[in-house]
Image (cartoon, grey):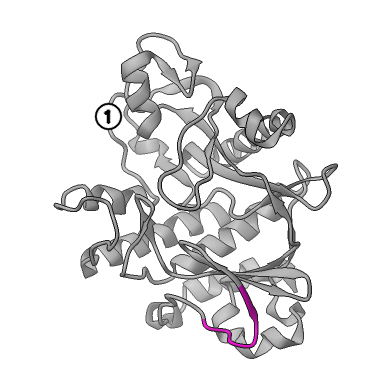
């Protein structure tokens, strides 16, 4: 059935049901072992594997906002499922199945909450670095470049502007903080955290970025940058985990609207960040409520990018 999940999800997105669906802010599966409640995902351990549920929570500046975004969790989950399948020959991943009918029986009573928004994956040890690949100059990378002509210690040519395409994609890791903001680090600093495996992680991260970029170009989408995560079940096997090329982990721009030297129309979480920057909010908990207009536009953007990429 897994081959049909993407088709079923498309049919769902185009149905009236999708317009009426309730948001899911958090799960409460009392007879399952809750391992972690992250910014977006609730993670349960089931029969030695992990059940990862993508909720409709949205975070910005490392703060979970109080307002859920309809369909967001489903889009994140199904996009990652799409990319896991597409990228499996580039690097192995932790995916077992996204078909609720193939989950352990204890999960099936929650099918209404799990459908399209969950995956069953191998339980993996996580490498404690965020693996960021940048193909364009944006965000904190652009801010650093303005000061030093470098990004995470990597020297870049003179004369680059906001949103300039880089000569080659660059690997710019960061720390993976449980509390507070992740911090950009150099490759050498990342090696101190995870060891020499970082060089293989760098190689695979850039390979995944290039493969994703080439595919997205055919859809009229620019992949400006993305964040990946890796783990292992044994130290010989590198596994792609978490999420892949989603609006939460990537900057997506439209080729037809792209203009070097300017901020770009963004079809990702940047839309919410930009709204929040207009408020008198100190970027600490609790976050502000999002108005309905921003929620609706955000949901529309997530759904639009999902349809463009997957279909």
Say which quadrant the N terminus sits in.
Answer: bottom right
Quadrant location of the C terminus? bottom right
- Furthest-left residue in view? 280
29 magenta-colored? yes
Residue nearest the observer in this picture, 139 or 164: 139
Residue 109 image point, x, y percent: 64, 91
Mark 1 highlights which residue? 262
User: Where 121 sits versus 309, above or below?
Assistant: below
Q: Nearer the viewer, residue 26 or 273?
A: 26
Is 184 left, or right, of 276 in this rendering?
right
Query: Total marks drawn?
Result: 1
- Left or right of 82, for residue 181: left
Q: Position of residue 271 (x, y in %)?
A: 30, 51
Image position of 188 with respect to 218: above or below: above
Give the magenta part as a residue range: 28-34
Rendering quarter of residue 302: bottom left
Q: Residue at x 74, y 33 (%)?
A: 197
Which residue extends farthest bottom? 109
Residue 25 at what x, y percent from top left?
42, 75
Q: Main secondary structure of the magenta part?
A: loop
Tag 1 secondary structure:
loop
Relative image position of residue 69 (x, y in whole percent): 37, 68
Q: Nearer the viewer, residue 63 or 304?
A: 63
Q: Residue at x 45, y 54 (%)?
A: 305
| Residue 311 in view | no
Which residue shows up at 85% across the image and 42% down it?
236
* Residue 41 in sight in this render: yes
Instruction: Categorize mark 1 by other alpha carbons within 10 Å: few (<14), some (14-19), many (20+).
Output: few
Note whether 128 is above or below 81 in the view shown: above
Question: Is residue 236 magenta-colored?
Answer: no
């Amino acid at each position: 059935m897994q081959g049909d999940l993407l088709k079923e999800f498309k049919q769902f997105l185009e149905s009236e049901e999708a317009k009426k669906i309730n948001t899911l802010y958090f799960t409460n599966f009392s007879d399952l072992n809750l391992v972690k409640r992250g910014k977006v995902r609730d993670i349960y351990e089931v029969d030695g594997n992990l059940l990862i549920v993508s909720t409709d929570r949205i975070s910005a500046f490392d703060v979970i906002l109080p307002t859920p975004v309809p369909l967001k969790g489903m889009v994140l989950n199904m996009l990652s499922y799409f990319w896991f399948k597409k990228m499996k020959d580039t690097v192995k991943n932790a995916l077992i199945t996204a078909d609720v009918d193939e989950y352990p029986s204890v999960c099936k009573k929650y099918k209404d909450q799990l459908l399209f928004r969950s995956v069953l994956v191998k339980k993996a040890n996580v490498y404690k670095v965020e693996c960021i690949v940048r193909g364009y100059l944006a965000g904190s990378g652009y801010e650093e470049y303005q000061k030093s002509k470098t990004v995470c210690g990597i020297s870049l040519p003179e004369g680059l502007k906001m949103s300039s395409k880089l000569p080659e994609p660059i690997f710019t890791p960061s720390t993976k903080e449980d509390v507070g903001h992740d911090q950009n680090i150099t490759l050498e600093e990342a090696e101190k955290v995870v060891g020499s495996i970082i060089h293989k992680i760098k190689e695979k991260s850039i390979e995944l970025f290039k493969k994703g970029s080439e595919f997205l170009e055919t859809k009229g989408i620019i992949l400006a940058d993305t964040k990946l995560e890796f783990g292992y079940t044994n130290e010989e096997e590198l596994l792609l985990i978490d999420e892949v090329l989603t609006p939460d982990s990537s900057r997506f721009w439209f080729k037809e609207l792209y203009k070097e030297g300017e901020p770009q129309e963004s079809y990702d979480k940047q839309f919410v960040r930009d709204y929040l920057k207009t408020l008198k909010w100190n970027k600490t908990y609790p976050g502000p409520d999002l108005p309905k207009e921003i929620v609706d536009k955000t949901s529309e953007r997530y759904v639009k990018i999902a349809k463009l990429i997957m279909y």
